Amino acid sequence: MKKLTFILFLIVLGFTFVLKAKDWKTEAIDSHVNAKAVLLIEAETGKVLYEKNSKESLPIASMSKLMTQYLVLNAIQNGTLSWESVYEPSDAVQQLMGKAAATKLGMAKGNAYTVKELFTAMTVNSANDAAMALAEMVSGTEEAFADLMNEQARKFKLKETSFYNASGLDGEYIGKGKEQTNHASARDVATIAQKLLEDHPEVLNFTRLTDFTTGDGVRVWSTNLMLPGMPQAFPGIDGLKTGFTEEAGACFVSTGVFEGKRVITVVMDVEANGTDTVNPRFELTRELIERIVLR
């Protein structure tokens, strides 16, 4: 009888442990900030700590640049590019320059720009012309580079991802049609971030920069307001990429080390607070980390 009681105790204890172990997966965050998709994972293991609608393919705006970063760093690693390789603006890049709403480095015809400056501008300030320029340096044309992005997505076994450009600008905005807008699920975005950090950890040397000065002497600031010294600073955050377009809404994929573990968060199409589309994505990211990782 005692043996049976002890066995039943172990079963109940084990059942309780399983429930507690799964609390993180089912517990809803009572947040004042809403988003269409949310994901929080451990970077090293890929373990999902929290998710909401993480498998739906959605527009990803400048989070697309994670894949651009990955492929440019591949090219540097295999020697087809170097940090000092030089680029002169093409006609295609000059056409993008005329679009007032597009964030850009502002390259002048006839001037030369190094890969390092272009990569820094794309990473820190989300410069779309810099992303396009790097795509041309790797593949000759942005269209060919998009094919390379999709090929890499297949290698990563991403199911809900499609790329049409290196920057993440909406297809309609650049005259390609709404259907040619980059899409991915939150899970796929997290996978790209995970692979980027695993294969090219040097990207953090750029993502943790709060600002940089262009070759023309212009100081520009990071779009990631959670970095140290920034308005939404949160200790531990050292990356990764913001995004915003009309189709995608406000997005953010973050990474940071908390209690000895690196985590990755993805928030997509975050609801604006009145006219404020910038801060809610950072507020939601903060809540995710505080309530799930640091609780």
Image (cartoon, rainbow, N blue to C red):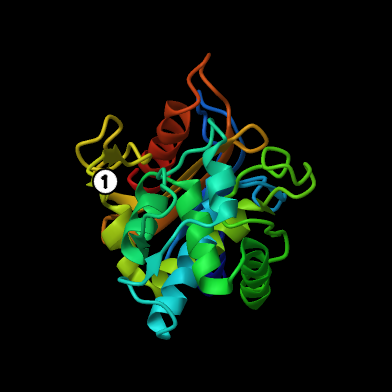
Write down the residue under mark 1.
216
* Residue 7 placement (x, y as % from top left): 54, 70
Q: Which residue is drawn at 54% across and 51% down?
A: 93
Q: Is residue 101 left or right of residue 246?
A: left
Q: In this view, does 287 lie above or below 18?
A: above
Q: In this view, does 169 lie to the left or right of 2?
A: right
The answer to whether residue 91 of the structure is visible from this angle is: yes
* Residue 252 placement (x, y as % from top left): 48, 43
Question: Which image quadrant: the C terminus?
Answer: top left
**Callout 1: SS:** loop
Q: In this view, does 121 lie to the left or right of 61?
A: left
Q: How many marks?
A: 1
Task: Kindly give the residue lying farthest to the left in the view shown.
Answer: 229
Q: Residue at x 63, y 56 (%)?
A: 165
The answer to whether residue 251 of the structure is visible from this angle is: no
Q: 79 or 1: which is nearer to us?
A: 79
**Quadrant position of residue 19:** bottom right
**Quadrant position of residue 174:** top right
Question: Which image quadrant: the N terminus?
Answer: bottom right
